[in-house]
Image (tube, rainbow, N blue to C red):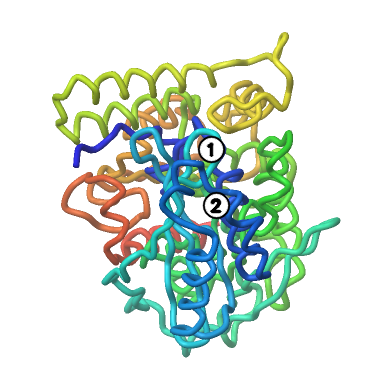
């Protein structure tokens, strides 16, 4: 099967996301379909299929298929869309199902009108499992489940604190692009969980929380910007860090990964007493520029010389260019550009992260970048370094072997690399600890 070109809009991990179609809308459509099946509303569920499918699948067959699933696996515990990718002119959504007696993933194929053109039971993959890294000495720290509370929102969170210590520093972890859990899970990898454990074992506490886009996906069907997506929750988490028993309220840090790192200076400008910000794999350029570079890299990596592949690549680049706007003009704020509101693009494109970082006076800045990162390049690191040259509060460290998930790799690779397990680099964690403890 010939591979198609993919529009990449994730500074973190969704390397197969297509924003010619609204991913959140696809997820909602998939979730609604399975909810109808669960509610026994088979006629309504059947109405989601394209007419071409209805000639091959009857409503009774759909009803029997779902009855067989329950007969084999028992009652459902949760059924949620977890991944979307392009398959030619169609969009494949993977839905993870957890049942009383096991798990079963499903794949729904959608056409451009969001009608279902395929419904499959996915074969159970043989996947790598997360393993606790050697530096995660659980005898040295404790973890407490809590919630990050904001008006109208409640986000599950974990507070990790070192044992038998007082006046310890606190770090708040801020995610990259896309919906994400508190561990920033990608396949078997959990970067934030690794970082929290590694820091805590050396006397540094932390807070990590579920990203709002994961829990309140329905809110992102309307106009929003990075304020709602990232900033409000990060500011609230930094305030929570000051309330943790034993924490040194004058020693609070923000660790921003990818998009979180890009926004770290903007967040810091709202929290003037912040001690420092860590910019990990943080874009220094505009997002459309980054997306163009990502697609070019993946296209060349695929080495597909077919004419259609080049046509699809050119189409992807053309679509990305539409996001390069700095004012709305006649465009409505909720107009979809690559599946994202136009207002989002205007906001993020008018943000100059290096200029904002330059204006910061108190917080120390630590910029870290991996050489095997195909999503954010060394070019971004060099731009940060040049832009903050002469700033005595800024330090920089380049790790040739690290990828975007901050783990050691032998090559740059693609998103497939994220499906193999590898812990966050112990060397990186040691460097972060040393930087924080210098004060």
Mark 2 Cα-neighbour bin, 10 Å: few <14, some 14–19, many ≥20: many
Q: Is residue 11 left or right of residue 223?
A: left
326 vs 109, nearest the viewer:
109
Q: Secondary structure at mark 2?
A: loop
Q: Outermost residue, bottom direction?
A: 139
Q: Residue at x 58, y 49 (%)?
A: 48
Q: Residue at x 46, y 34 (%)?
A: 283
Q: Secondary structure at mark 1?
A: helix
- Residue 156 percent coordinates (x, y): 67, 69
Which corner quadrant holds the N terminus? top left
- Residue 428 percent coordinates (x, y): 36, 58
- Residue 90 percent coordinates (x, y): 41, 38
298 vs 11, nearest the viewer:
298
Mark 1 or mark 2: name the one nearer the start of the chain: 2
Labelled disc at residue 262: 1
Q: Please say whether residue 282 is visible from this viewpoint.
A: no
The residue pinned by badge 2 equals: 175
Of marks 1 and 2, the one in the foreground: 2
Labelled disc at residue 332: none
Which corner quadrant holds the C terminus? bottom right
Mark 1 Cα-neighbour bin, 10 Å: few <14, some 14–19, many ≥20: many
Q: Outermost residue, top direction?
A: 330
Q: Please say whether residue 391 is visible from this viewpoint.
A: yes
55 vs 242, nearest the viewer:
55
Q: Residue at x 31, y 62 (%)?
A: 427
2 vs 338, nearest the viewer:
2
Q: Is residue 257 left or right of residue 210?
A: left
**Label 1, label 2: how far apart the Cα atoms are:** 10 Å
């Amino acid at each position: 099967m010939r591979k198609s070109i993919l529009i990449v809009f994730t500074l973190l991990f969704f390397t197969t996301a297509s924003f010619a179609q609204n991913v959140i809308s696809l997820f909602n459509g998939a979730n609604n379909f399975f909810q109808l099946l669960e509610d026994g509303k088979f006629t309504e569920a059947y109405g989601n299929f394209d007419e071409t499918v209805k000639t091959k699948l009857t409503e009774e067959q759909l009803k029997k298929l779902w009855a067989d699933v329950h007969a084999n696996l028992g009652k459902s515990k949760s059924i949620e869309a977890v991944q979307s990718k392009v398959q030619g002119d169609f969009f494949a959504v993977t839905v993870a199902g957890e049942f009383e007696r096991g798990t079963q993933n499903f794949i729904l194929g959608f056409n451009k009108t969001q009608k279902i053109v395929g419904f499959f039971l996915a074969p159970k993959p043989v996947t790598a499992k997360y393993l606790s890294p050697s530096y995660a000495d659980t005898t040295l720290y404790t973890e407490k489940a809590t919630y990050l509370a904001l008006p109208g929102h409640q986000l599950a969170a974990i507070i990790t604190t070192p044992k038998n210590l007082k006046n310890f520093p606190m770090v708040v972890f801020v995610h990259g692009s896309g919906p994400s859990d508190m561990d920033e899970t990608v396949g078997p990898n959990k970067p934030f969980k690794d970082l929290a454990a590694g820091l805590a074992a050396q006397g540094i506490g932390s807070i990590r929380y579920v990203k709002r886009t994961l829990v309140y996906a329905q809110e992102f069907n309307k106009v929003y910007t990075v304020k709602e997506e990232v900033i409000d929750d990060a500011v609230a988490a930094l305030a929570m860090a000051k309330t943790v028993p034993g924490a040194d309220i004058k020693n609070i840090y923000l660790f921003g990964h990818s998009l979180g790192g890009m926004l770290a200076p903007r967040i810091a400008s709202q929290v003037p007493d912040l001690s420092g910000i860590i910019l990990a794999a943080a874009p220094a350029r505009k997002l459309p520029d980054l997306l163009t570079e990502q697609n070019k890299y993946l296209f060349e990596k695929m080495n597909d010389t077919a004419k259609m592949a080049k046509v699809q690549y050119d189409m992807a680049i053309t679509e990305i260019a539409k996001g390069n706007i700095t004012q709305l003009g006649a465009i409505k704020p909720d107009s979809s550009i690559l599946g994202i509101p136009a207002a989002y693009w205007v906001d993020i494109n008018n943000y100059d992260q290096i200029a904002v970082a330059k204006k910061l006076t108190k917080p120390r800045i630590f910029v870290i970048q991996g050489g095997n990162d195909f999503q954010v390049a060394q070019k971004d690191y060099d731009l940060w370094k040049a832009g903050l040259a002469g700033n005595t509060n800024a330090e920089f460290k380049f790790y040739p072997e690290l990828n975007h998930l901050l783990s050691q790799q032998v090559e740059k690779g693609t998103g497939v690399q994220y499906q193999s397990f590898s812990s966050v680099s112990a060397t990186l964690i040691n460097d972060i600890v040393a930087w924080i403890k210098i004060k």
